[in-house]
Amino acid sequence: MAVASEVSLSKSSSIHPPVQKPKVMKSKESPRSQHLALEARKADDMRPNSLRVVKVQDIVFKLPYSFFEQMPIEIREAIFQHNRGISLDDPAVLEGPTVDQFKTLLWAHFTYPSLSLKSLTLDRLLTIAELSYRYRLKHLMAWAIHGLAFVTHHTDTPFRSAPSEAFVRMLNIAIKYHQKELSTAIQNKWMTRIHWQEVSPIPAILLADAYNLRTLLTHAYYVYLVLMEPRIAKSLRIDIECPLSPKQIKHVYCGYYSLRAYWWNLRRTAPEFIRSEECSELHSQCIEVWRRRWAVAGSRAYPSSDINILSRLMSIQQTLEADMLLSVCMTVQCREQAIASISKKRQEIVDNLHHHFDLDL
């Protein structure tokens, strides 16, 4: 519809002719008659085809009352308390959204049900979801959450390159809408981007801590620790100009000392593997060779620090996969089981990573 575009044309935007102020005439009627006349005028102002005047930042919008009828009565009453919004002289003030965000909501409302995801950026889609929830516009809420689920799971999802702000907004929406599966999906995508160090882990720490999202919080702490490890190793402070609370900083240090001790033990203790059926009297040799080559691989220098155990294990696995002595001195099946035990150990660490940061306390 052309309605939405008309809303943005001027300081006093309108989709209908301006509201005419009722003329005040002197009357000799009794107080009761005047009261009844006033109530009648209020009822007349509440007609579906009447207008309401709202102000967003420094822009005034004149909108049909039917737009606000989509909202629950308690929200309408909060917006138009003290009979505000009847005239241009006394608009109802909408706190929260910016002018552009409110225009996006209006566009979505007046375009529905002909809305198309193809015409929307991720930012505008998030805005529709946020404001339709704020004003409980159920028709837009249902459409927006369906659209966000679609773009999240799409092979060419915008979250592959989205900034941390988009993940924060999206996860807030999923939680408010009680969309558990969507929340898990966006957390997984966020964690991947954090581990690739494409986005800062700090926003994830703050949001995950607020909502008690332990898995996201753990991985965000882990990556933040990896980034801060050079400073911690030199006894430099990491809490200067840092938005993390003292309690959150404490969790980071817990992870540092726990993972450091864990790695020093793991580098000397090769992961155990299941004996293959084809391996008989030579199995003791397989175990001994595996232990020795693990110790050699674990003592090598790698690009990742000792704290970054997950990355370190991937490097060790690549080293041992290319180790010729394992191919010569172990049976094929035992070698495969031994190499696979590294991936299992890595997954075991991932599953129990929260313990290192004392997140059970």
Image (cartoon, helix red, strand yellow):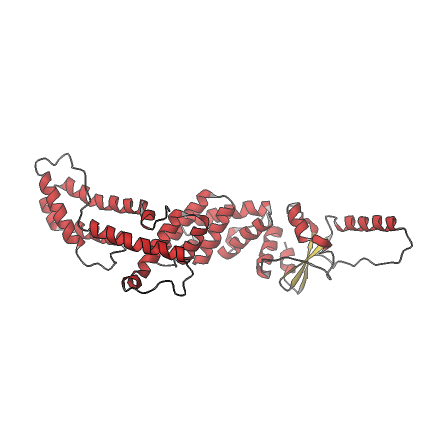
Q: Residue at left 22%, top 54%?
A: 315
The answer to whether residue 154 is visible is no
**x then y, percent, for residue 11:** 66, 65
Q: Residue furthest left?
A: 281
Considering depth in this image, is 42 or 236 the residue closer to the camera? 236
Number of numbered callouts drawn:
0
**x then y, percent, for residue 192:** 36, 52
Residue 26, image quadrant:
bottom right
Q: Residue at left 7%, top 36%?
A: 281
Q: Residue at left 12%, top 50%?
A: 324
Say whether residue 277 is left or right of residue 55.
Answer: left
Say whether residue 97 is left or right of residue 199.
Answer: right
Considering depth in this image, is 101 or 298 the residue closer to the camera? 298
**x then y, percent, for residue 133:** 56, 49
**x then y, percent, for residue 333:** 16, 40
Q: Residue at left 22%, top 46%?
A: 342
Q: Residue furthest right?
A: 28
The answer to whether residue 182 is visible is yes
